Amino acid sequence: MQNDDNAINYFKGRGAQVKPQNHFRKLEYAQEHIEAIDEELFSDPKTEIFFEHPKKIINKVISPDIGLDYSMNPYQGCEHGCVYCYARNTHTYWGFNAGLDFETKIIVKPDAHLLLEKEISKPNYKVKPIMLSGNTDCYQPLERKFEITRKMLMVLLKFKHPVGIITKNSLILRDLDILIPMAEMNLISVSISITSLREKTRRMLEPRTASVNKRLETVKVLSQNGIPVNVNVAPIIPSINSDEIPAIIKKVADAGAKSVMYTMVRLNGDVAIIFEDWIRKNFPDRADKVLNQIKEIHGGTLNDSRFGKRMRGEGNTADAIEQLFSVSKKKYFAGRKIEPLDCSLFVVPGLQKQMELF
């Protein structure tokens, strides 16, 4: 756990504790002590909001590991502050760093619902399920204020367009009035990520996410309302949460989830720097062990981008985790599954009225 030496420089409520250099920028601001003493002088990191008005909102997914062809991200950056988040690396494209900037400088796309309606109204549009979000959480804290995700769901319901949501925030329950009618038409599935049942571990790994109990309650409420729920036990981190796999699977099965999946932690790019700093501050007694096990899973390196391998890893540790997961899934999820979403109901409202008049 976090020791006293690190506590004085530890930012509570934030995952990353460092600001890795942005490799796309030649010049960066630096804070230096007036007497040239070599020490970091971070001010208390507050959340800043930046508005972006892109030309499109639907993105083609090139990864064969995801399972959906398209995604939409109403926000870039994420206040949840998950220290392991692979999406941190994308924040450098915006001129920020993957560390504290990722969770304190949030890019908001206020016109996302208008772009969505425009894109799926085009005559040549081919309907396929879209993933919301895929990069950063569409129900992160700022959604309570901006309601962009809600507006997008309203568009999708109007067009009867299928969508898969990934989140770890109980705020999704706010939108039951939209999700329930979508579920009745088999247009919606929800994936809830649960990393640990230990609240202390959750707070360190994912400081601004919904609590463990709230997430389990979210799975239960969604399931009771006929909304199919998958649970991602993700990411599995050896010697941090790998021992919890059977308990998590049992809990989410009892809550009504219809399917369960898992992914291994992968520390690509600057995420490796952020995670290593985090684990040495919070778990100094086992830091080397954890990092070495992650390297073993990913071919001797913390960075692994190989399609087909990066989500599950390989080697003895990865095999043991896969076996533990498979046995637990077979025990608690036998006979459960989520049906493919229905694309046949899709309709462009204005076009439908024209056809009826004709």
Image (cartoon, grey):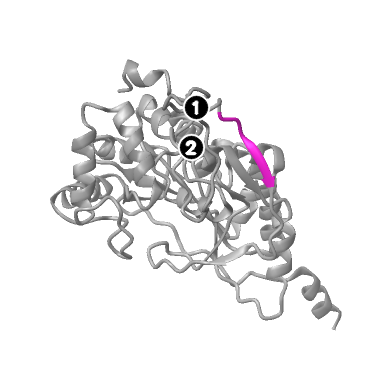
**Where does the magenta region start and end?**
45-50
Q: Position of residue 215 (x, y in %)?
A: 47, 35
The residue under label 1 is which amino acid type? Gly
Mark 2 and mark 1: Cα distance apart in space = 8 Å
Q: Which residue is rendered at x = 75% and y = 60% of the image?
A: 114
Q: Viewer-proximal residue, 56 or 24?
A: 24
Q: What percent of the width, then of the height, locates residue 148?
A: 69, 48
**Of pointers 2 and 1, the one earlier in the residue sequence:** 1
Q: Position of residue 112 (x, y in %)?
A: 69, 56
Give the residue pinned by disc 1. 13
**Furthest residue in direction top, as rendered:** 4
Q: Which residue is mark 2?
A: 81
Answer left or right for 341 relative to 147.
Answer: left
Q: Residue at x 70, y 44 (%)?
A: 147
Left or right for 160, reference 19: right
The image quadrant of residue 176 is top right
Q: Is residue 153 visible?
A: yes
Mark linked to residue 77: none
On the question of residue 189 being in view, the answer is: no
